[in-house]
Amino acid sequence: MNLRFIALVALLTSLLAFGTDAMLPALPEIGAALGVSEPNRVQLVVSSFMLGAGLGQLFFGPFSDYLGRKPAILLGLGIFIAGCVVSLIAQSFEMMLAGRVLQGLGVAGPRTASIAMVRDLYKGREMARIMSFVMVVFILVPALAPLMGQVVMLAWGWRSVFVSFILFAMLAFIWMALGQPETHRARRRFSWLDMARALTAVFSNRQTMGFALVAGLNFSAFVAYLSSIEQIFREVFLVGQLFPLYFSIMALAIGGAAFINGHLVMRLGMHRLITIAVRAIAGFSAIYTLILLLDPSAESLWLFLAWGVLSFFSVGLVFGNVNALAMEPMGENAGIAAATIGAVSTVIAVAVGVPLGQLYDGSTLPLVAGFAALGLGTLLMIRLTPRSP
């Protein structure tokens, strides 16, 4: 197993999580500095970044197939840095959001092409295993990112968070430029006809699109969580500057699951694992929802953490496997397939997760009930999706 390759892929994919989670402690300060009167509207700093990441994959997927994974990653990192500069100097909330969308468009390059790099070198359960170990390394970033963002913000102000993004991206750029050879050697000249055929192959494959929808529904709950979690911990549980600690506990639950998944998937298979995991998410969330409906005073930090650890442990069993299942039928169209899967799942996640996050009303009930409903919808989609031989 190439540990150096795994570490590089983890670094490239973690830029998405770092660009999301490190912003969370700074959201109240950003809202106050840029004159945002509606507290829930500040959530758009998170969701606009994710929307850009979803849309950007539609460009970088074909780009990486025709011109190579390495140029796609380097171009994406450059766009991400440009978006950070826009947000760094923003004097209005609209300019901040424009910079965040640009950052998301840029981060789509390393996000899409790095997954395609894994598909270039591995397939099937071995690919799922590699992605699981990538997740173990990757999870350290979202676990530590809020703490890093809070430390940077307290020391130098919220704008300095974007300086840390720039430095992180420059490190990835140098490593990719100097330390990783091109993995996609069977590139071909660009042709609109070939691209149309590739997109047709992706959209017409029921397994690929079915699991792209599964990924989108699963990710929707996560988007709602990321959008509202800072408000929940700060306003419902009054944790103050301990927010990064509690956030990290849930993030590490995902990492632990990803590590265990790397071993289980070789013996039990991807499909069985995600089915069990989604059932657990729906079940835990339904029980928590029922408790809150029967006795709202039962709400407590420890009950929320228990639900979060159990639910996000299950989420960790889904992430790597569902992408591998969607990519499994794809071969030479891996870049376009990764782009389409990422775009479809992210757009669905933003379209569903953002309104769910906006339902935040000073309690955890909208979030937990949303997890239960989305878990049931995901189970139905898994059941309706066929598997290729």
Image (cartoon, rainbow, N blue to C red):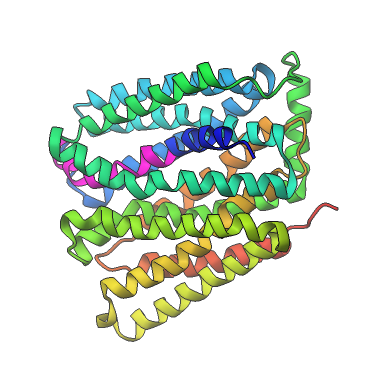
Please determine whether, in this image, residue 207 is positioned above or below residue 341: below
- Residue 267 highlighted magenta (yes or no): no
Q: Who's the residue at 37% across and 37% down the image?
A: 19
The furthest residue to the right: 389
Residue sitting nearer the eye, 223 or 20: 20
Total marks in image = 0
Please determine whether, in this image, residue 159 is positioned above or below residue 250: above
Q: Who's the residue at 29% across and 60% down the image?
A: 246
- Residue 28 highlighted magenta (yes or no): yes
Please determine whether, in this image, residue 14 is positioned above or below residue 83: below
* Quadrant placement of the N terminus: top right
Q: Taking 78 as reference, is 210 left or right? A: right
Please say whether residue 42 is visible from this viewpoint.
no
Q: Who's the residue at 41% across and 56% down the image?
A: 252
Residue sitting nearer the eye, 179 or 356: 179
Magenta stretch secondary structure, dominant: helix
Q: Where does residue 248 sit, x and y in percent of width and height? A: 34, 55
Please say whether residue 74 is visible from this viewpoint.
yes
Magenta residues, start to end: 16-33
The furthest residue to the bottom: 294
Q: Taking 224 as reference, is 151 left or right? A: left
Q: Where does residue 47 sit, x and y in percent of width and height? A: 39, 43
Q: Taking 5 as reference, is 351 left or right? A: left
Q: Where does residue 356 sit, x and y in percent of width and height? A: 40, 58
Q: Where does residue 129 sit, x and y in percent of width and height? A: 64, 49
Q: Taking 345 as reference, is 224 left or right? A: left
Please determine whether, in this image, residue 61 is positioned above or below residue 216: above
